Image (cartoon, grey):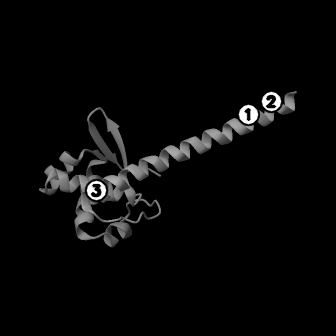
Amino acid sequence: MYRQEGIGKKYLAALEKIKVNLEKLNEKMDVMIELRQATGKDIQPLPEAPLDVITLLNLPDHLRKTAVAMCRNGRATAEEIANQTNRARAMESSYLNQLVIMGYLKKQRKGKKTLFYIEKQ
């Protein structure tokens, strides 16, 4: 009887891990769909990586400017980043979502606003 309970707990733990991973995949797919609709292009995700100097230097100029602004803020909305980069909010939103897909940033919904942030590793 005790052995069966142990096996049941293992299955529940495995199912919980699967659920968490599926939720992460769904979030990434939502971002990819949003970007595809906005740009009409497919964006290939890269493995998750921190925003270090080498990474920043390898980014295209338009994404680097957004990433540097994010490094200064740590946590910000697209509007806050747009104010710093002197670009349109919609443009910054697109760039921030590209950085999310690439694994450099994370995003979190707070009411009607979306906060972007760099996850400390």
The location of residue 3, given as percent across then percent down, is 86, 33
Depth check: give the residue in front, 84 or 100: 100
Answer yes or no: is residue 9 visible: yes
Residue at 26% of width from left, 45% of height from top?
76
Query: Pointer 1: residues within 10 angstroms few (<14), some, or many (20+)?
Result: few
Q: Secondary structure at mark 3?
A: helix
Residue wearing tag 3: 37
Kindly identify the amino acid type of the residue bearing the numbered disc 3: Gln
Query: Pointer 3: residues within 10 angstroms few (<14), some, or many (20+)?
Result: few
Q: Which mark is residue 9?
A: 1
Residue wearing tag 2: 5
Residue at 38% of width from left, 57% of height from top?
101
Q: Which mark is residue 65?
A: none
Sequence-wise, the earlier of marks 2 and 3 is: 2
105 versus 111 height, above or below: below
Position of the N terminus, as image quadrant, is top right
Q: CA distance from mark 1 to mark 2?
A: 6 Å
Q: Are marks 1 and 2 in contact (CB under 8 Å)?
A: yes
Depth check: give the residue in front, 92 or 18: 18
Kindly identify the amino acid type of the residue bearing the numbered disc 1: Lys
The location of residue 79, given as percent across then percent down, is 18, 46
Q: Secondary structure at mark 2?
A: helix
Answer yes or no: is residue 105 visible: no
**Extreme residue in the top direction:** 1
